[in-house]
Amino acid sequence: MASATEWVEGARLRTLPAAVAPVLAGTGAAAAVGGAVWWKALLCLVVALGLQVGVNYANDYSDGIRGTDADRVGPLRLVGSGAAQAPVVRAAAFGCFGVAAVAGTVLALTSGWWLLLVGASAIAAAWFYTGGSRPYGYRGYGELGVFVFFGLVAVLGTTYVQAGRLTWAALAGAVGVGAYACAILVANNIRDIPSDRSTGKRTLAVLLGDLASRRLYVALVLGAQGLGVALVPWHPWAALSLLALVPALPATRVMLAGTRGPALIPVLRDTGRAELVYAGLLGLALVISGAGG
């Protein structure tokens, strides 16, 4: 039976910035139009964290039973390493999805019933990323799923349930946060190209190849930063989001240097930090705009 430490490692805490960042940016966009509702923001955070940890356990389960995790260089895989039985990890994944569903239902009942459909789609996307008979993460669509659900849906949904409407600032933040979330996944998949290729897991990195994937990583980071700058004429404090380059640039240098294998693990950490700084400072800039208005 897996220890508590192994369960925490299996939850892949380094990926949690991808869950927190959309809530920060989306709440800032709501605050910019005087619509921030902090208890709803907290529920959005519960939804995002539940989905993120849930998808991490779901990936652990699905990759483990397929044998994809037999030769991994990344963090502990509970099923692949034999630390936990597959049904237990699957139950943990659905438990996390259940927590997200409860919090999401409260938001839907207070903001719009149709959000239940959005939430159901998010849970389905989390499961079928690597689960089911035709997982889309094995066919090169993982980044698209991350961009949609941890970028557009997460940021715009956070803004909408609080402010009751969407704004251009929310859209810019959603695209920027989604780009950073994709960059994390691209870095992860570049690290795993050898093992994924050998097991038939056709991620976008496998399909594009090593060099093109590294260039995509840089484009995603710079694109996100550019969107923050684009908001400066209307929200001058958005320039603060450029401070995300402090952790992003070292990660970019490592990526462009052609570093491989376990040496890429710090890139995941630094990209996650950059996304969190980016979203946090962008959200703060929008809060300041709302207070000034």
Image (tube, rainbow, N blue to C red):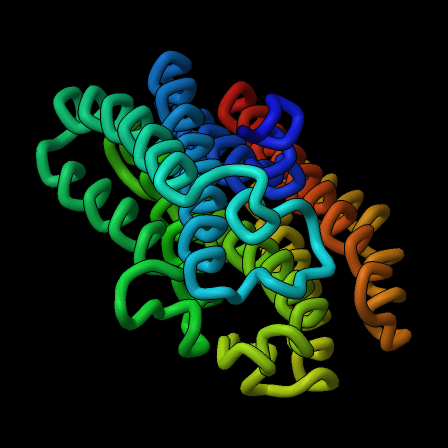
- Where residue 151 sits in the image (x, y, percent)? 45, 51
- Where residue 43 sits in the image (x, y, percent)? 36, 20
Q: Residue at x 80, y 67 (%)?
A: 261
Q: Quadrant of residue 54?
A: top left
Q: Quadrant of residue 45?
A: top left
Looking at the image, residue 48 sits to the left or right of residue 125; the answer is right
Q: Is residue 83 above or below residue 186?
A: above
Relative to the observer, which residue lies in front, 219 or 126?
126
Looking at the image, residue 279 sits to the left or right of residue 239; the answer is left
Relative to the observer, which residue lies in front, 6 or 209?
6
Relative to the observer, which residue lies in front, 107 or 29?
107
Q: Residue at x 43, y 73 (%)?
A: 138
Disc tally is 0
Looking at the image, residue 33 sits to the left or right of residue 60; the answer is left
Relative to the observer, which residue lies in front, 27 or 78?
78
- Where residue 155 sits in the image (x, y, percent)? 42, 42
Q: Is residue 223 visible?
A: no
Looking at the image, residue 156 sits to the left or right of residue 272; the answer is left
Q: Is residue 199 above or below residue 291?
A: below
Q: Residue at x 51, y 75 (%)?
A: 203
Q: Is residue 40 visible?
A: yes
Q: Is residue 35 above or below residue 117?
A: above
- Where residue 58 sits in the image (x, y, percent)? 41, 47
Q: Residue at x 39, y 32 (%)?
A: 92
Quadrant (top left/top right/bottom left/bottom right) for the N terminus: top right
**Residue that lies at the very extreme toward the top in this rendered image:** 39
